[in-house]
Every structure is written in structure tokens, then in C-alpha cells.
Image: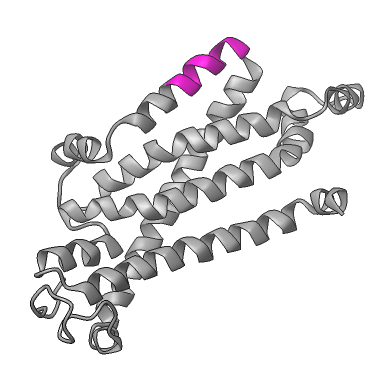
Amino acid sequence: MSVPLAAPADDGPGNPWFSWQYVLDNAETLRGALEFHAGLTARAVVLALIVALPLAVLAYWIKPLTGPILALSGVLYTIPSLALLALLAPAVGTTTDTSVLIALVLYALLVLVRNALTGLTQVPDEVRDAATGMGYGRFGRLIRVELPLALPGIMTGLRLATVSTVALVTVGSLIGQGGLGDLILGGFRNNFYKAEIVTGSVLCLALALILDLLLAGVGRLLTPWARRRAS
């Protein structure tokens, strides 16, 4: 990613904290970094959700597995991101975003599993008993009753995982696969180019906010009963 040379790292007019001229001159670079960042975030969260939901259901159905599943996802979450990326990159290659994607999926698991499991365990016993009395088996009850009622918890986990993933994508800049993080790191390497650092940071924050608001809206649409209960 090519960036303009910065002025000396001081507080003078040649190196402002924000510059519209920088934004205009690098519009294509900024757009590409933003699209890459958003795309990588979306892929990571979707893959993590695909893995997390079955794990949450397994922990919900088989109580002795709850501790090990949460413990494993917790251990994965505590691995330092730099160390995890250093372990993954040589194995899957440093020229693609695969290592970053794997790391992001692993980090999102804890939040998604924990919130999905919380949502499932909060389904009232009388609702489960009523569904069983209506002839629903374990899978039918899960699909038709328990997962829909657990949606508020699942959506909360999805929002938290998405926002944290937006921030974690920037770590991929260490191998040139960090989206907006490439701009932030490039600004530090480019004689502390303030405009580049701030622009990348602001876009990252804006992306997290927009995605969170979108997911909040989707959650409200999918759980109209929760809105009625709150009112």
C-alpha cells in the first residue's frame, strides 16, 4: 500500500492530526482498506458463529461439557494476538489473510458461545415443558422454540464479537493483512504521519459503530416480542 511521505514528526502545519488533502489524495487506498477490513470482519464473525452455535447447543444439552467448552474457548481468547499470529502465519502463509482469519475466529468464539449458552439457559422451563407436551422432540424444540427465544442473547454476543473483531483485524497489519491497521501502522513507520494514523483510526471506529448499529437493528427486527416486553 503506497502512502505519501510525511512531514517531520512535530506539531507544525506540515504534519497535522487530520488532513482532508490526505483523504482526497488517498481516497482509493482508504476505500480499499475499508472494504478489506469490513470483509475480513464479516467472514470471521460468520465463521465463528457457525462454530459457536453448535458448541453452545452441545454445552446446553450435555451439562458436563459446559465447563470444558467454556474453558477451551477462554484459553484461546487469552492467547496474545501477536503470539497467535506468529504461530499461525508460518503454517498457513504470510501472503494471504488466512492466518488473520483463523485468529479472529478463535477470539470470537468465547463471546459467542457464552452469550448463546446464556440465551438458551434463560428459556423458561414451562416453555420447554409446553413445547414437549405439544410433541416437539429435542431438535424440533431447539429450532422452533429455544433458539428463537435465545436470540436476544445470541445477538448481544454477535454485536460484541463484531466490534471486538473490527479492532482485532488491525493486528494483521504485522503481515500486511490488517486493512485499516495497515494505515495506522504505516503512519507510525512513515515518520509518525499523524493524518494517516488518525484517518485509519477514525475509519476503524466508524466501521465498528455502523456494524453495531446495523446488528442492533437486525436484533430488534428478529425479536419483536422483546420490544413489546420492554414497553
In this view of the protein, which residue sits in the foreground, 101 or 192?
A: 192
Q: Nearer the viewer, residue 10 or 153?
A: 10
Q: Nearer the viewer, residue 167 or 72?
A: 167
Q: Is residue 205 visible?
A: yes
Q: Is residue 65 magenta?
A: yes
Image quadrant in which you'd find residue 36:
bottom left
1 in relation to 68, above or below? below
> Does the rendering let one see residue 35?
no
Which residue is farthest front? 11
Quadrant position of the C terminus in the picture: bottom right
Residue shown at 61% from the left, 34% from the top: 116
Residue 63 shown left or right of residue 199 in the figure: right
In this view, the residue in front, 160 or 188, is 188
Q: Position of residue 167 (x, y in %)?
A: 37, 53
Q: Main secondary structure of the magenta part?
A: helix
Residue 89 versus residue 133 in the image, above or below: below
Provide residue 155's location: percent of width, then percent of height.
62, 47
- The reply to whether the magenta stretch includes residue 38 is no
Q: Single out the residue that lies furthest toward the top.
A: 64
Residue occupying the point 55% across, 58% down: 212
Left or right relative to 40: residue 65: right
Residue 78 percent coordinates (x, y): 35, 30
Q: Quadrant of residue 221?
A: bottom right
What residue sits 30% from the left and 71% below the top? 198
Left or right, residue 6 beside residue 219: left
State the count of labels.
0
Dividing the picture into quadrants, the one containing residue 99 is top left
Classify 38 as above or below 158: below
> Which span of residues is magenta-colored?
63-71
Question: Which x, y percent locates residue 97?
Answer: 25, 52
